[in-house]
Image (spheres, rainbow, N blue to C red):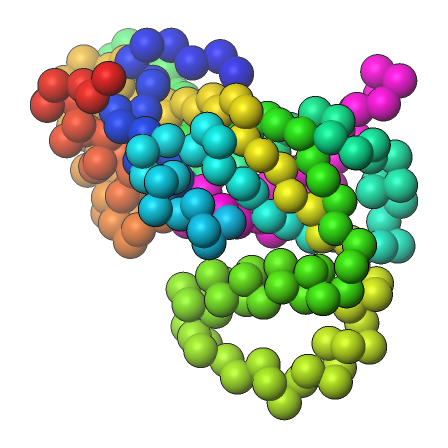
Amino acid sequence: MWTPEHFRAATPEWDAELVGQCPFGLLVTSNDSTPEATHVPMLIHPDDRERAATGLTGCRILGHLARLNSHWTRIEESQPALLVFPGVHGYVSPTVYGEHPAAPTWNYAAVHVTGPITLVHDPKETMTVIDRTIDVLEGSGPAAHWDREPSRDYFDQIIRGVVAFEVRADKVESSYKLSQDQPPDRRAAAVEASARQGRDPGSLGHWMSVAAHAQKEPRSE
């Protein structure tokens, strides 16, 4: 991943936060030089969340895909996999600067995780991954705390149609391109314009504000 110095995460915690806020990403593997990708929900293993705040390296990422998706049949045990978390992004119009010359750009935050992948076929272990995924996603949505217990029989019917996986993060790369390369006045204007569209956690406005604040402080190493 191309990451200029001024787009690096100010603290390792940023990567874990972004993955938690934007858990829908890409599982990418390659055989015979042909890359293959599947869009899937993925989450940090619950047992690794505390240490993930100090860096995702060494942490486990859990996910699942449909067994009808033949992608999993071409995955070999412990082969390298790339997990892409696109994160937040958005167009920045030159109109926000109020001056010329200017050029448009696209701001974004993204995390790439690379490591060996292990497929999970056992129905009970797969159900554990599903339950953990529900715990994370239900806990952050408007219909939080959905009671899944009345649907257990239904889960038992469909769980064999799911393949879960675990990836150990051996390499973590990220980029937070949030107008840090702009002069202070233009950056402030971009942050303000983005914040007007929302500062909720996980929004582009939130991340631009976080990055702007971090740039005023000494960078953590």
Image x and y of residue 83, in percent: 61, 34
Q: Give the image quarter of residue 33.
A: top right
Image x and y of residue 14, in percent: 33, 35
- Residue at 75% x, 44% y: name it: 119
Task: Check the image and report above or below for 162 versus 50.
Answer: below
Task: Check the image and report above or below for 24 versus 102.
Answer: below
Q: Give the image quarter of residue 107.
A: top left
Q: Is residue 32 magenta?
A: yes
Q: How many marks?
A: 0
Task: Check the image and report above or below for 156 versus 191.
Answer: below
Task: Check the image and report above or below for 74 versus 141.
Answer: above
- Near-viewer residue (209 or 168): 168
- Residue at 34% x, 18% y: name it: 7
Image x and y of residue 134, in percent: 55, 66
Q: Would you say residue 147 is visible in this rendering?
A: yes
Dominant secondary-structure state across the stretch colored magenta = strand
Q: Is residue 172 magenta?
A: no
Relative horizontal placement of residue 33, taking residue 89 as reference (left or right): right
- Near-viewer residue (175 or 57): 57
- Near-viewer residue (157 or 184): 157
| Bounds of the magenta segment | 19-44
Image x and y of residue 9, in percent: 32, 24
- Residue at 48% x, 24% y: name it: 172
- Near-viewer residue (65 or 193): 65
